[in-house]
Image (cartoon, rainbow, N blue to C red):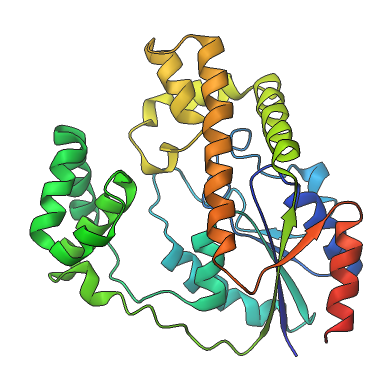
Amino acid sequence: MNNLIVITGATASGKTSVAVELAKKLGCDIISADSRQIFRQIPIGTAAPTVDEMQGIVHHFVGCKNLDEYYSAATFESEVMALLPKLWQTNDYVILCGGSMMYVDAVVNGIDDLPDISPAIRQHAASIYRDGGIEAIRAQLQILDPDYYQQVDLNNHKRLVHAVEICLQAGKPYSSLRTGQRKQRDFKVFKFAIDLEREQLFDRINRRVEMMIDAGLEDEARRVYPLRHLNSLNTVGYKEMFAMFDGTLDRETAIARLQKNTRVFAKKQLTWLKRDPSVIYVQYPNVADKIYNYIKAHQ
């Protein structure tokens, strides 16, 4: 039986180190399910695993795309599903590790078949938001897909822009393409989440941000600052640094805002996980050992 072992949880909860330790026990590869670690040029701000942290374990989907390349959960599903059979030829196990919940769900449950977005439409949708702000992209979506407009978080501009892109590319409402049907997978899935007390998690987040700053996050962000319009950089860590470069935040405030926004992101991840009854929560210490023992007991 082919097995996919998912290790997820909030940012800064220690997923990478647990996945590496487990991979060493199982002798398998790791697939990263992180929508930002997949990009080159930004390893510090995305907390991408270093060569030392990988400890010789093969990691897929880390630092393999350029910042200007379009990438999505649907693309990730397609590429991972093509890779898995190759990895299972030599091992019954593969670890999927990351906190991008849509990416994890795309592999585990499947995702609706949506059209690829052309560069012209992507630029057009981006210009609506750039020139008119969130009100303009809301108004466009309300015209193109009034049903989805009633369901979507109207403060989440990424989802609004994405929905407009699909409507324009498909020539039909995004809501008409959303089936919500789970795809059947021919492999067994174990889904684990690292469980931390909220205070402990927030302390880890604050310390990680400080470590990123010490490791050179500001210099990294400055190098990609000319590309700040790209969606790949529209994320926590770079937005705060860019605001500092623009002069709208001082350095101390930017770092504090980065810590706060990361904590908010972690809360959203935890809320997502709470909706999934298949998640098995594991607490420190010896997380990798506990996961290994659970898998072996439930083969």
User: Which residue is nearer to you in this view: 15 or 206?
Assistant: 206
Position of 122 relative to 277 (above/below)? above
Q: Is residue 110 left or right of residue 51?
A: left
- Residue 51 placement: quadrant: top right
- Residue visible at 22% across and 63% down in the picture: 148
Q: Is residue 114 left or right of residue 148?
A: right
Q: Position of residue 213 (x, y in %)?
A: 65, 21
Position of 287 relative to 187 (above/below)? above
Q: Is residue 8 left or right of residue 265?
A: right
Observer able to see residue 109: yes
- Residue visible at 24% across and 53% down in the picture: 119
Position of 59 relative to 157 (above/below)? below
Q: Position of residue 240 (x, y in %)?
A: 47, 24
Image label count:
0
Q: Position of residue 161 (x, y in %)?
A: 25, 50
Q: Quadrant of the N terminus?
A: bottom right
- Residue visible at 75% across and 60% down in the picture: 58
Q: Quadrant of the C terminus?
A: bottom right
- Residue 247 placement: quadrant: top left
Q: Position of residue 47 (x, y in %)?
A: 65, 39
User: Which residue is nearer to you in this view: 95 or 109?
Assistant: 109
- Residue 121 placement: quadrant: bottom left
| Residue lying farthest to the left in this orientation | 143
Q: Is residue 222 left or right of residue 155?
A: right
- Residue visible at 59% across and 61% down in the picture: 273
Observer able to see residue 145: no
